[in-house]
Image (cartoon, rainbow, N blue to C red):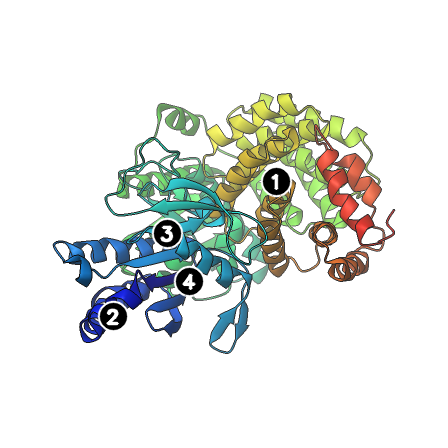
Amino acid sequence: MSADVVGYSRLMGHSESGTLARLKAARADVVDPAIAEHGGRIVKTTGDGLLIEFSSAVDAVQCGIAVQSSMAERADGAAKDDLLQYRIGVHVGDIIIDGEDIFGDGVNIAARIEGLAEPGGVAISDTVSQHLRGHVDVAFVDRGEHAVKNIDRPLHVWGWKPGGEANGAATLAEPAPSERPSIAVLPFDNMSGDSEQGYFADGITEDIITDLSKVSGLLVIARNSSFAYKGKAPDIRQVSRELGVRYVLEGSVRRAANRIRINAQMIDGATGGHLWAERYDRDLEDIFEVQDEVTRTIVGALKVHLTEGEKALRESRGKIDPEAYDLLVRARQMMLQLRPDASLQARAMLERVIALGSGVAIAYARLSIITFADYANRWNDATVDNLAQAVELAGKAIEADEGEPQGHIALALALCWQKRLDEAEIPAKRAVELDPNSADAYTGLGTVCEYQGKAEDAVALYTHAHRLDPQWDMALHFMGRALFALGRLDEAEAVFKRRLTFTPNSDMTRFYLACLYGLTGQHEEARAMWAEVLKVNPDFSVEYVRQSLPYADPSWIDRAIEGLRQANIECR
């Protein structure tokens, strides 16, 4: 965030002592408390100006809105020559840290955007706007693109001012009366006395997350981000801030043969106070009933109403064979390891679930995803026939239980890679309907849109997926790719670099960065990045990428690859 006082020199010329007194009072009463409340850090001051760093775009914008709203109230009735107003600009981008100071492109752009803000208003970059949808209850107005000094491309800017009117212009979001209650489920502790049972406690946690995420009236953080806290003892208020949620669920699992005991408690992330705690003692075959009870308790506590469709889906769930449930949990853990041998082991477990005849819908869905992943990653001698098999398996999952979202996600993926994009859009949308908090579902729909050539829509869907799962690196990879396709190269570069902090060994993200550097004339950086691609994956094939990615119009990927040629990179 960059902020400075409008007409500061003029004010000082009118009354130096009076202006300094008003500035000091504004800092003490409004600006500094708002920065502290929203977790900001003042990097430096320059007379009337401030540079502030935040860990969250939402926090930065909410801070700006709070400052400008309070300053507007203080200015009511003030004479023009005594009127103290700030301009505020917010941007998300790369920075260079030097001790307590920060530099870089992100800082420069924030300063330029601040200059485009109305007196008393807040201006934000298009990158920031993607983080705000559904999370800030004011309407930002599209101010269009602006050419600014020392920035090589126009900046797309959105603006807001207290009491401002949209005047029919496109708005970022209509003000919402209230945001959906938001919750994160931390990994349940394994209390079984056997460390090898840790996978089972993780499985219970994941199933509760999955169950809650199907409630449209909640915002539920996904498994990847919740599990970043596994093995730690974080302050719940810190978790609440970092994941952007109001409530946190934590608990423990104890298993003895086919009996389970689950302790769960929900905490208010704002205060750290406990809202409720409950213990469940059940046979393992009743695990779905336990999950339903936990969900009903949370829904009741937060006064969330289930739709008729959500009620019907819950009524259809019954018991599950204990061995089948155990195998489903183990298979999911194997799938998350993303290795060809783990894929084979997960496949064997899921085939056993189907043979048992219990939990077959989810088993077929995960088999479909494994079969697709083997093809996409060129594992286990996979061929193009894998895609037809994946379609068939996903169809069996939907036939067994039309209300299982993973079956629709699996079908959308397989159809997409068969280049049946319009067909893929149908199950992709159905998955979002069934599981409105699934980052996987939003990413699946975003992928279909991207391959159809609707990259703007894809960016919005990937951004929402990232909100639901802030620690999930693939959402960042896909977002960077769509931004690249739109020609928003500096944003794409920042997102790709962010992805590499999560997954340092990604060959594909490095490939896109090498292409991007080649296209922007950074040929030395392109060659260095290409060397890293081959270090990570000596068998990397540009031709395989070009042929396998199912774009309806592959011309953009050809343009990206042209960046390698411009950097004199020999690739196969």
Q: Quadrant of residue 510?
A: bottom right
Residue at the disc numbered 3? 117
Residue type at numbered disc 3: Ala
In the image, farthest residue toward the bottom: 99
Q: Secondary structure at mark 2?
A: helix
Left or right: 379 with respect to 494? right
Instruction: Please tell me the numbered disc located at residue 13.
Output: 2
Q: Quadrant of the N terminus?
A: bottom left
Q: Secondary structure at mark 1?
A: loop
Q: Nearer the viewer, mark 2 or mark 4?
A: 2
Q: Secondary structure at mark 4?
A: loop
Instruction: Please tell me the numbered disc located at residue 486.
Output: 1
The first of marks 2 and 4 along the sequence is 2
Residue type at numbered disc 4: Phe
Q: Nearer the viewer, mark 4 or mark 1?
A: 1
Viewer-proximal residue among 293 and 79: 79
Residue type at numbered disc 1: Leu
Left or right: 504 with respect to 384? left
Q: Nearer the viewer, mark 2 or mark 3?
A: 2
The first of marks 4 and 1 along the sequence is 4
Left or right: 201 with respect to 18? right
Give the Cα distance between marks 2 and 3.
Answer: 23 Å
Residue at the disc numbered 4? 54
Residue at left offset 72%, top offset 58%: 522
Locate residue 217, reporting x and y percent. Answer: 35, 36
Viewer-proximal residue among 25 and 425: 25
Give the Cα distance between marks 4 and 1.
Answer: 27 Å
Packing grade of label 2 (10 A; few <14, some 14-19, many >=20) is few
